């Protein structure tokens, strides 16, 4: 491969095949509008519209004189140093799947409205992922449970109870249990790293010595533990040091996205992806072997689509080649069956690894069985990576059983009648437990079907939602959101941080430690006291550690608390050879949006396009194009039946993903709740929690329209495919490292356009000149920026129907292009593809086409050169969007924040309380609390788009002027996208400041403006992507990255 | 006849337009407040500085309405000034609760907003007050108001009058909260060198920048 010109790019298979569906997308500015007007659309919609129009007039007449009276409600006693309307940031801790990350939460007059990374925290480094960004929406979710509910015995009806009612019940009930030492008592908890939780657990077990404590979460790292236990004698936790690694081999590992340390890993990885003359063209190389296309796979220099069940064989191939080169005696089983890697590919990887001994790493994903982890540890040991690119710490919960095994034991015990009282802390086991255990009515059974819990005397559930699990329990208690509760947590390396609440529980929720304290009869009852006690137990008496506590709370991290690094020896193990499998393998993965299903009620995450599939509001069975052709799947959304035997069958829509392994089906978990997608847990059994063998798949009648965004906003005139193939490489420029090294300025020579002049007098910007640079080489496409932008700028959610019509409102989208990867053809790939991600938002063109067509001057430049959008002037002609070559303007078709189209209403169904319906046509007052008051909430009929976060710019400018600064320091103004970006690919600043980072990047040889032929003079430039695939079998491998 | 047919609708239109304009709808707006607090007494007769109560006006976008505690500084139930006045009973009840309902103690007082800008306008008090714009410039002679009312239309064209020519409306930093300041000797704004000096002193941005949409709309 030379420069990117030679490649064939496409965004979807529809585009590749140029199907009518794709043409419809590109020919319509706002697809589907005519259809809707001509047919009148849905009659209900039209009536709705008339009703609305009538109501608008009536209200208009009444209120035209003056808008409604507003009250100003000052505090009775104002806390010191508080200026109303000036946001304050507090450090707290976010936890997902047992690993904590420090965050800073922006609080506006006591309301948390935005989450940023904590730069003092070693696993945030100032950055966040999309789940953290979306947490604010969960906090203000009116669907969260708001009442303590008790089931009236023998019925499905629940009565609302007060906390005192529950306390009275618990006192009597748990007193009785205490008398028998807790026999028959069982706690089912979601895992947590919180030391306070651990402390409460031991206190609980001390009070109820015979009680059982089981932890369960559907997404586990059990295989990793077991692999380490086999390899080292006891479980060790691996830590990658990607900044030191020149060659990485990822086996089914999505370490840039789904790893608990992904924020740090993405940062370290990207730091080695910015080759230029200053760092000697330093660049690491990433090999990825995986079945599904992951975010990590999209960053690969060489990617091999290998079925997940063949990963072990592929690793053995590599190991054999490495052993031969290193001359070590291997006891590893020889690869058997069909070899997934070509000999040349295995040899090339091995050669690269051996050439970079001690500066490479083999990374295995948690869904791979323990044997693969053992083999990888062994191979890593040969390659001298232990202590260099991989270090180890002792695993904290070394003795715990596997989650699924614990659940199986619990199910067995319940069946035998051995459980009298079950307390469930968080999680959602009825929804996500392995299907064969029979926990759920959720497992595709009717709501009347028996639930395993029916055999238990008393079930108490603490949960954020009145969900599938609560519906099977006798008592339901609302849980406090993590932004409402005191707590603590350990980062991936053991670093302790304390979590402080940003707001009182909105719905009177309890945290798990508070509930445990109540049930144990602890003398402390508040979360604060419990967390302080744990802190005191670790750091000494309360008085002496006051300063440390305060500092820890302020910093969001307790200094020097990481676990010590250990260097365990790999033990010789003999492993049974891999068993070849037949049929389709079915791989269950956590979903990038809803994870294991816990975020299913979050509209932001539901509407967030998956980084690879670009699907929103649902999941699909992901297939390779070859399998699709074989099965007769013609288009995305065609239904296929997946049969796992023993009656477990599911008809689901298929999604054809280039680069997916053939013979493998990926089923993202977490959906099938509230009408979005399907519930893959129904097919998931303990025997194949992550990779299930021998599935059958066939095409069945029917299709389901998926809500994907991949073809939206594609620019395509009637110039023909050949022309398009010439144009895309101009939009996304990329080159091989060696080509770049020889031609550092290749990016500007991808295309030459004649210099053009503006029709207008060009303005000189002498004050600030805000600009942005996006490094495509560092961008992993993770999508944190999209959600950060949504949270910062009050961007509404439109719902799946409107997404299907191409009306999503995201100001920032990430264009994902597939490309035929001619380099990857070696290695057994049938259809190798590579991916380029390109974040695309308004580029604030100095010569902006949108401004030239606005009839009312609602979009104009300001003195800093920002292309501003003046909502109160906009009359909604949409000419600007028509004339925008980048298609980054969004039109408010409906009252997206309120009114009948408000789509957050994925309804939990009717409330268990008689007579009360949980339906929200309008934004509730609680939801309004989550809006950013510094940004206008746009109304219907108004165009909107990226503002470079003008509210953040103005805030700093006002501060600078008030305090008389002579200049604004570089880096002080950061738009939400750049602040969130885990790989630091987005840089913002003043182009008139010669020392600013953004100015340096604008002058970087890799920088190029987009659509130069239109003379847009955009303020955002892109830095071309550099790949480091090498040229196949060359010797040059030995030198790269040196 | 013909003239009437043309002039009539135009006249009617103008009347309607005027009727909807801020001059007609907003100026003079004086809602009843939960407590009959007199600015004329406090700011006028007693001469309390605006910033004694509106403490955040130099630091934040809002010139915050003071917390009840500020009133209690002088009007506490134990030793406060005029603590038996019937006008103060609502205040004391809000702060201390009433005899039969002590649980109401500490309830905030819902004051009614008088100067209400549209939600898409972002006005920052501190930016103005620190750059020579006096309180009276927009709020009028508050020191003479028994009940606060809106003096200026607060329309965009009214804002722009000043943003297009800020010099004559600036005053020295010492006179910001002075309600009676009449300008430099010789009449306010009539000494061009005073305006020019203040513009320079406060480092006021150029008129083009002061008219940028993004200055006030975000």
Image (tube, coloured by chain):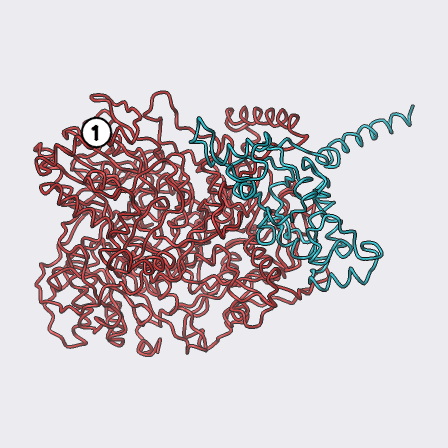
Give the chain ID for the cyan colour: B
For residue A851, above or below residue A439: below
Q: Quadrant of residue A60?
A: top right
Relative image position of residue A11 (x, y in whole percent):
44, 52
The chain holding disc 1 is A
Between A279 and A690, the residue placed more toward the observer is A279
Q: Residue at 56% across / 55% down in the picture?
A: A955
Q: Quadrant of the N terminus of chain A?
A: bottom left
Q: Point out residue A960 in the picture as x, y percentages from the top left corner.
A: 59, 62
| Secondary structure at numbered mark 1 | helix
Relative depth, front residue between B59 and A9: B59
The residue where tag 1 is placed is A169
Q: Nearer the viewer, residue A668 or A557?
A: A557
Q: Is residue A809 left or right of residue A573?
A: right
Residue at 13 percent across and 59 percent down: it is A229
Q: Is residue A376 left or right of residue A1010?
A: left
Q: Is residue A969 left or right of residue A115?
A: right
Task: Quadrant for the C terminus of chain A, please.
Answer: bottom left
Task: Please indicate, yes or no, whether residue A783 appears anywhere in the rendered image.
Answer: no
- Above or below, A562 relative to A516: below
Q: Horizontal and vertical percent for residue B19?
A: 75, 31
Q: Residue at x 20, y 50 (%)?
A: A199
Q: A534 or A152, which is in the foreground?
A: A534
Q: Any idea which chain is the red one in this picture? A: A
Placement of A845 over or under A617, stated as above or below: below
Structural crowding at the residue carrying mark 1, measured as other residues with C-alpha within 10 Å and reported as few (<14), some (14–19) or many (≥20): few
Residue A599 percent coordinates (x, y):
35, 42
Is any atom of residue A98 visible in this view?
Answer: yes
- Left or right of residue A371, residue A274 in this image: right
């Amino acid at each position: 491969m030379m420069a990117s010109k030679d490649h064939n790019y496409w965004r979807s298979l529809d585009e590749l095949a140029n199907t009518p569906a794709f043409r419809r997308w590109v020919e319509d500015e706002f697809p589907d509008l005519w259809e809707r007007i001509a047919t009148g659309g849905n009659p209900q919609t039209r009536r709705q519209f008339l009703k609305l129009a009538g109501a608008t007039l009536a209200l208009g007449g009444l209120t035209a004189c003056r808008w409604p009276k507003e009250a100003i409600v000052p505090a009775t006693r104002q806390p010191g140093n508080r200026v109303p309307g000036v946001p304050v940031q507090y450090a707290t801790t976010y936890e997902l799947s047992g690993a904590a990350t420090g965050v800073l939460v922006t609080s506006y007059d006591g309301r948390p409205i935005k989450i940023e990374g904590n730069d003092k925290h070693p696993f945030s480094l100032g950055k966040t992922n999309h789940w953290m960004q979306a947490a604010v929406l969960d906090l203000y979710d009116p669907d969260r449970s708001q009442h303590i509910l008790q089931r009236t015995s023998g019925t499905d009806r629940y009565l609302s109870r007060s906390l005192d009612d529950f306390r009275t019940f618990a006192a009597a009930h748990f007193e009785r249990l205490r008398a028998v030492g807790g026999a028959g008592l069982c706690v089912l908890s979601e895992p947590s790293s919180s030391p306070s939780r651990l402390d409460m657990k031991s206190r609980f077990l001390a009070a109820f010595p015979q009680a059982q404590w089981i932890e369960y979460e559907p997404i586990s790292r059990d295989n990793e533990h077991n692999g380490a236990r086999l390899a080292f004698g006891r479980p060790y936790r691996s830590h990658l040091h990607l900044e030191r690694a020149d060659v990485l081999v990822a086996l089914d590992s999505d370490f840039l996205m789904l790893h608990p340390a992904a924020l740090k890993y993405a940062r370290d990885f990207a730091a080695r992806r910015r080759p230029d003359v200053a760092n000697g063209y330093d660049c690491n190389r990433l090999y990825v072997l995986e079945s599904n296309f992951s975010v990590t796979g999209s960053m690969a220099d060489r990617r091999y689509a290998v079925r997940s069940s063949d990963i072990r064989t592929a690793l053995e191939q590599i190991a054999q080649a490495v052993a031969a080169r290193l001359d070590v005696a291997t006891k590893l089983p020889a690869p058997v069956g069909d070899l997934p890697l070509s000999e040349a590919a295995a040899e090339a990887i091995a050669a690269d690894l051996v050439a970079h001994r001690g500066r490479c790493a083999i990374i295995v994903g948690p869904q791979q069985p323990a044997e693969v982890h053992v083999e990888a540890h062994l191979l890593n040991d040969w390659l001298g990576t232990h202590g260099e690119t991989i270090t180890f710490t002792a695993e904290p919960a070394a003795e715990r059983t596997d989650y699924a095994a614990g659940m199986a034991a619990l199910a067995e015990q319940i069946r035998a009648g051995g459980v009298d009282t079950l307390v469930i802390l968080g999680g959602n086991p009825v929804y996500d437990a392995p299907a064969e255990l029979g926990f759920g009515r959720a497992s595709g059974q009717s709501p009347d079907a028996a639930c395993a819990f029916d055999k238990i005397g008393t079930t108490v559930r603490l949960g954020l939602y009145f969900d599938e699990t609560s519906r099977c329990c006798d008592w339901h208690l609302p849980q406090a959101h993590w932004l409402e509760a005191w707590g603590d947590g350990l980062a991936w390396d053991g670093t302790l941080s304390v979590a402080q609440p940003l707001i009182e529980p909105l719905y009177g929720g309890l945290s798990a430690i508070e509930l445990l304290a109540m049930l144990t009869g602890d003398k402390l009852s508040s979360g604060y006291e419990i967390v302080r006690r744990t802190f005191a137990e670790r750091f000494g008496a309360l008085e002496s550690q006051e300063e440390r506590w305060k500092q820890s709370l302020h910093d969001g991290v307790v200094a020097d608390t990481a676990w010590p690094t250990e260097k365990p020896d790999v033990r010789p193990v003999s492993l049974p050879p891999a068993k070849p499998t037949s049929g389709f393998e079915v791989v269950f993965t956590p979903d990038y949006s809803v994870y294991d299903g816990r975020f299913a009620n979050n509209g932001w995450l539901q509407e967030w396009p998956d980084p690879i599939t670009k699907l929103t509001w649902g999941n699909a069975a992901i297939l390779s194009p070859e399998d699709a052709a074989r099965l007769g799947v013609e288009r995305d959304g065609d239904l296929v039946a997946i049969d796992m035997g023993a009656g477990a069958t599911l008809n689901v829509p298929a999604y054809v993903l280039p680069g997916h392994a053939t013979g493998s089906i990926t089923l993202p978990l977490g959906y099938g709740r509230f009408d979005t997608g399907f519930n893959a847990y129904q097919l998931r059994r303990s025997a194949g929690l992550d990779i299930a063998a021998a599935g059958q798949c066939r095409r069945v009648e029917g299709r389901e329209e998926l809500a994907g965004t991949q073809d939206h906003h594609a620019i395509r005139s009637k110039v023909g495919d050949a022309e398009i193939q010439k144009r895309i490489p101009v939009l996304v420029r990329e080159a091989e490292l060696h080509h770049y090294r020889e031609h550092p300025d290749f990016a500007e020579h991808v295309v030459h356009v004649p210099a053009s002049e503006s029709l207008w007098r060009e303005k000189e910007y002498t004050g600030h000149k805000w600009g942005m640079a996006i490094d495509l080489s560092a961008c992993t496409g993770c999508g944190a920026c999209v959600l950060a932008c949504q949270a910062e700028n009050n961007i509404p959610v439109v719902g799946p129907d409107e997404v299907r019509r191409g009306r999503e409102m995201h100001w920032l989208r990430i264009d994902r292009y597939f490309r035929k990867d001619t380099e990857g053809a070696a290695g057994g790939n049938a259809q190798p593809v590579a991916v380029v991600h390109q974040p695309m938002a308004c580029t604030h063109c100095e010569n902006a086409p949108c401004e030239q067509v606005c009839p009312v001057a609602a979009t104009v430049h300001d003195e800093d050169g920002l292309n501003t959008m003046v909502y109160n002037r906009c009359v909604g002609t949409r000419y600007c969007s028509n004339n925008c070559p980048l298609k980054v303007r969004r039109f408010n078709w409906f009252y997206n924040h309120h009114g009948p189209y408000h789509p957050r209403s994925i309804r939990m169904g009717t409330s268990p309380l008689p007579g009360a319906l949980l339906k929200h046509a309008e934004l509730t007052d609680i939801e309004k609390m989550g809006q950013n008051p510094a940004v206008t909430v746009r109304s219907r009929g108004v165009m909107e788009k990226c503002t470079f976060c003008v509210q953040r710019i103005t805030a700093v400018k006002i501060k600078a002027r008030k305090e008389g600064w002579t200049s604004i320091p570089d880096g002080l103004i950061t738009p939400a996208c750049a602040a969130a970006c885990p790989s630091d690919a987005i840089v913002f600043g003043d182009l008139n400041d010669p020392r600013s980072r953004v100015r340096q990047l604008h002058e970087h040889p890799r920088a190029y403006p987009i659509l130069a032929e239109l003379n847009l003079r955009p303020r955002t430039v892109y830095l071309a992507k550099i790949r480091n695939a090498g040229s196949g079998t060359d010797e040059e491998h030995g030198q790269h990255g040196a | 006849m013909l003239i009437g047919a043309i002039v009539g609708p135009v006249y009617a239109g103008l009347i309607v337009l005027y009727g909807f304009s801020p001059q007609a709808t907003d100026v003079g707006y004086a809602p009843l407040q939960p407590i009959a607090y007199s600015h004329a007494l406090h700011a006028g007769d007693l001469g309390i500085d605006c910033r004694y109560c509106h403490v955040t006006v130099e630091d934040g976008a809002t010139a915050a309405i003071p917390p009840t505690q500020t009133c209690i500084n002088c009007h506490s139930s134990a030793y406060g000034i005029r603590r038996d006045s019937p006008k103060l009973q609502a205040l004391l009840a809000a702060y201390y609760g009433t005899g039969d309902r002590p649980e109401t103690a500490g309830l905030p007082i819902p004051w009614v907003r008088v100067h209400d800008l549209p939600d898409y306008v972002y006005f920052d008090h501190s930016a103005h007050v620190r750059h020579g714009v006096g309180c009276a410039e927009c709020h009028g002679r508050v020191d003479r108001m028994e009940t606060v009312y809106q003096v200026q239309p607060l329309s965009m064209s009214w804002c722009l009058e000043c943003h297009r020519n800020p010099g004559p409306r600036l005053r020295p930093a010492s006179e910001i909260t002075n309600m009676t300041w009449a300008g430099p000797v010789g009449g306010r704004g009539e000494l061009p060198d005073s305006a020019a000096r203040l513009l320079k002193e406060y480092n006021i941005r150029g008129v083009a920048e002061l008219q940028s949409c993004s200055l006030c709309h975000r």
